[in-house]
Amino acid sequence: MKKEFGMKSIRHQHGHSVVTENAEDFKGTLIKLAKYLRKYKLSLFFVILFAILSTIFTIIGPKLLGNATTLIYEGVINKISGSNAGIDFNAIARLLVLLGLLYVLSAIFSYIQGFLMTTTAMKTTYMLRKEISFKLNKLPLSYFDKVSTGEILSKITNDVDTLNQSLNQSLTQILTSISTVLGILIMMFTINLELTVVALLIIPISLSLILRIIKKSQKYFYNQQKHLGLLNGHTEEMYSGHMIIKAFNKEDYSVDIFDKHNETLYESAWKSQFLSGLIMPVMFFISNLGYVAICIIGGHLVILNKLAVGDIQAFIQYVRQFTHPLNQIANISNILQQTAAAAERVFNFLDEKEEIPDKKETLEITFEKTSAKNSDKVFIDGSVTFEHVKFGYSKEKVIIEDFSANIKPGQKVAIVGPTGAGKTTVIKLLMRFYDVIGGRILVSGHDIKDYSRKDLRSMFGMVLQDTWLYNASIKDNIKYGNLNTTDDEIYNAARAAHAEHFIKTLPGGYDMIINEDADNISVGQKQLLTIARAIISKPKILIFDEATSSVDTRTEVLIQKAMETLMQNRTSFIIAHRLSTIINADLILVMNNGNIVEQGNHKNLLNKNGFYANLYNSQFK
């Protein structure tokens, strides 16, 4: 089920703006994520332990430096007063050695916890991507009908990456920030209560001013992201549709829209960045006022011998360190929201309903006749029977009401009808991309649900109108039909598909790489390669879905010859709008509104002067 998320614009401490989604079930998602991380609980325990130890050792540093400063100050005062006691360099050296040791230990613990956290985060995202990949292969095609490709890719990439970054960086930041704030507070209280109260008064003053600035800038950040998206979307459209823009002389119109978005983006970005840029100066100004107050009060306490000079130095260092983790803690809620939203999208995807699993005991198949009487394998002869099939992509809208047909082995069957009649749907049901809601489909006398999906689909070879070739060599694209095939079989398949001639004229021949968009060869050439791929798969049943609709007449003749070669001794289903291409079919199934309204061969159907005759004659009017 698709989830809708509320959008929230977030300003990070460095002034950057992003738009994140709020999780609908924040608490439940975090609990689910915690359960998911339970398998790494030992690693996480040491991450927390080493993060706290690293922070503690870092926090102790300013106190030791303050003690060293006090020793130097007291030594100088003793010299001035004429006392024999001078600066105790041995004590200072011991403090500095101890300080260096603490910083080394802090760095080691920080490195270990970083290594453990990175390992845990990468293992988690690795497993999530692996589970998503497995899930993709288990989802029914109906899921992809309602969810866009971009949304699925976003879950695999953006959401998992967000989780990875949150676990790898933000979780450690949260631990160290909380530990640092608590540790610094304790150290400040141990130095002096009055100075601590003054330091804490800085926080509400700073926060009140910062929150006012954030409140003011929030709408500008939102508008910035909104118009950045509009600008990017318009730019992508201009790039992908530049031929159409030029053809209709819309260059000026397109530039005007771009300028409008760009101007609005400029205004929003300028205001948001200016206001966010005020935050650090305001914080520095308030902090500096606090330092002045601390120095005055601290100096007074030193005069009264209630405070050591080194303690003032240590305290000022603690105050400087105190503001940074506070900023990080302020962002924790945003980080958690972002993490929970990403996790929720991933977990919702993993919880999607999978296609109905195969039966535990399925039929074994063979494509070769066996003389063994007790063979448990079903010989696939290519016969197909539709018995009162009923189907709809949703229960409310039934597309196929009552579809029945009996196709004998080796027959050439054409399925014709107007757009939306249900022709392609029949093929999808045959290959069990969708399950029927009534009736049944039999292949070689057995219900297709009795076969495993893998075995069922191994019986078929498909050549579609929309060819699919991937970024690899021509040889590899042909080989995709049967990965265990030999080079000689690939060459024979290319010859049978009438593709070898054009392949040899290409640079590199069979080794030429087809680019990502597969636009370095023509549409007809792509179609011939898909036919060669189908020949390699050695199917028992063939499906041609508008295989010649996008090519010129000369290429169509080549494709028709390749199809005739491929269809020999095989049951074939041909979906075609150009009825002149299927006049030699053994059986023509005429569909309208999901039902077979007529069936027979071309001559008989024309003699009936019915629905098929009207369709056929309309081509010549």
Image: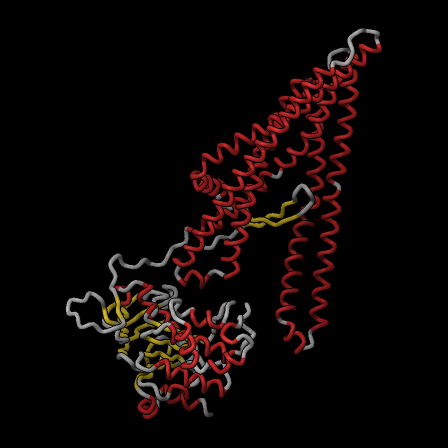
Q: Position of residue 266 (x, y in %)?
A: 74, 56
Q: Quadrant of residue 569?
A: bottom left
Q: Is residue 224 left or right of residue 21?
A: right
Q: Nearer the viewer, residue 504 or 133?
A: 504
Q: Vertical placement of 65 versus 22: above or below?
A: above
- In the displayed image of the protein, which residue is found farthest to the left? 373
Q: Quadrant of residue 589?
A: bottom left
Q: In the rendered image, is residue 307 in sight?
A: yes
Q: Position of residue 563 (x, y in %)?
A: 39, 82
Q: In the rendered image, is residue 589 in sight?
A: no
Q: Quadrant of residue 426?
A: bottom left
- The residue depicted at 26 percent of the width and 67 percent of the height is 365
- Render colour scheme: secondary structure
Q: Nearer the viewer, residue 161 or 612?
A: 161
- The residue depicted at 38 percent of the width and 55 percent of the height is 353
- The residue depicted at 25 percent of the width and 73 percent of the height is 368
Q: Check the picture and name the quadrant holding the N terminus.
A: bottom left
- In the displayed image of the protein, which residue is found farthest to the top? 83
Q: Position of residue 98 (x, y in %)?
A: 64, 21
Q: Is residue 497 left or right of residue 318?
A: left
- The residue depicted at 52 percent of the width and 67 percent of the height is 471
Q: Is residue 617 left or right of residue 321?
A: left
Q: Position of residue 394 (x, y in %)?
A: 38, 64
